Image (cartoon, rainbow, N blue to C red):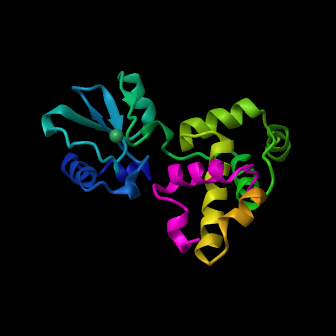
C-alpha cells in the first residue's frame, strides 16, 4: 500500500487534502511547516499554501520531523487502531440503557484497567464512558417520547430522579425542551 501510495504526487495529495477526503486518512499526512502540525486527509482546517506543506506516508516521520498531531482532525489517532476491549465495552454501554454504569463492570467486560478506558474515551470520543452512556440513554428516551410516551413516566427507568433533572439533561443534549416533542 505504501509503495503504491508513494507514487502519489505532491499535487495529488494536496488535491485530496483540499477535498477533505476521508478515504486517505492515515495513509499519508500533510505537515504544515508554519504551524508544525500534521493533518489527516479529511481535515477541515483552512488549506495552507502549497509552499508551507510537505507530505509524509508514516505518522512516525511527521513526529521525527517535529510535527504535532492536529486537534481538529485528530491525526494522531490514524491509522485507527481500535483496542480489543473497546468494542465489548461500547456494546455494553449501548445495550444497557436502564443500568447504572459501574466502572468495575466495564473493567470486567473489557478485561482492562478503568484508567485506560477513561483515557481512551477522553482522547478518542472526547467524553467519559458515563457521559457517553448518558447520551445514548437520552437518545433512547427521545425515540420513545417521539412515539408518544410521556417522559414523566419513563425518566426513572434511565436513573433520573426528578422531572427537572431530566428536562435539564434533555435540553442540554438536544437544545430544545422535551415538552416540544409530543406536546405532553
Ligand atoms: Zn488537521
- Residue 124 position by quadrant: top right
Q: Can you see residue 29?
A: yes
Ligand 1 resides in the quarter of the picture at: top left
Q: Which of 135/128 is in front? A: 135
Residue 69, position as x, y percentages in the image:
41, 32
Residue 40, position as x, y percentages in the image:
37, 44
Residue 104, position as x, y percentages in the image:
84, 38
Left or right placement of residue 80 versus residue 48 in this view: right
Residue 106, position as x, y percentages in the image:
79, 43
> How many numbered marks appear?
0
For the point 62% across and 40% down, the residue is 121
120 relative to 180, above or below: above
For the point 23% across and 49% down, the residue is 9
Instruction: Assess whether residue 30 is covered by the magenta stretch.
Output: no
Q: Which of 112/62 is in front? A: 112
Q: Which of 9/77 is in front? A: 77
Q: Quadrant of the C terminus?
A: bottom right
- Residue 183 position by quadrant: bottom right
58 relative to 149, above or below: above
What span is colored magenta in the figure?
158-184
Q: Can you see residue 96?
A: no
Instruction: Assess whether residue 168 is covered by the magenta stretch.
Output: yes
Left or right placement of residue 83 versus residue 29 in this view: right
Query: For the stretch drawn in magenta, what is the main secondary structure?
Result: helix
For the point 72% across and 47% down, the residue is 84
Left or right placement of residue 172 versus residue 41 in this view: right
- Residue 56 position by quadrant: top left
For the point 73% across and 64% down, the residue is 154
Amino acid at each position: 500500500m505504501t509503495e503504491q501510495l508513494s507514487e502519489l504526487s505532491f499535487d495529488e495529495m494536496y488535491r485530496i487534502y483540499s477535498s477533505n477526503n476521508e478515504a486517505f486518512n492515515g495513509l499519508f499526512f500533510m505537515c504544515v511547516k508554519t504551524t508544525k502540525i500534521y493533518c489527516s486527509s479529511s481535515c477541515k482546517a483552512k488549506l495552507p499554501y502549497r509552499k508551507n506543506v510537505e507530505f509524509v506516508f508514516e505518522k512516525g516521520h511527521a513526529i521525527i520531523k517535529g510535527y504535532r498531531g492536529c486537534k481538529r482532525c485528530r491525526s494522531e489517532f490514524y491509522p485507527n487502531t481500535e483496542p480489543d476491549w473497546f468494542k465489548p465495552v461500547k456494546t455494553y454501554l449501548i445495550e444497557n440503557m436502564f443500568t447504572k454504569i459501574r466502572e468495575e463492570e466495564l473493567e470486567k467486560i473489557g478485561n482492562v484497567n478503568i484508567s485506560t478506558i477513561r483515557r481512551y474515551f477522553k482522547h478518542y470520543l472526547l467524553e467519559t464512558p458515563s457521559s457517553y452512556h448518558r447520551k445514548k440513554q437520552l437518545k433512547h428516551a427521545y425515540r420513545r417520547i417521539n412515539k408518544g410516551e410521556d417522559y414523566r413516566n419513563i425518566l426513572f427507568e434511565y436513573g433520573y430522579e426528578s422531572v427537572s433533572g431530566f428536562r435539564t439533561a434533555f435540553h442540554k443534549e438536544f437544545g430544545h425542551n422535551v415538552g416540544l416533542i409530543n406536546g405532553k
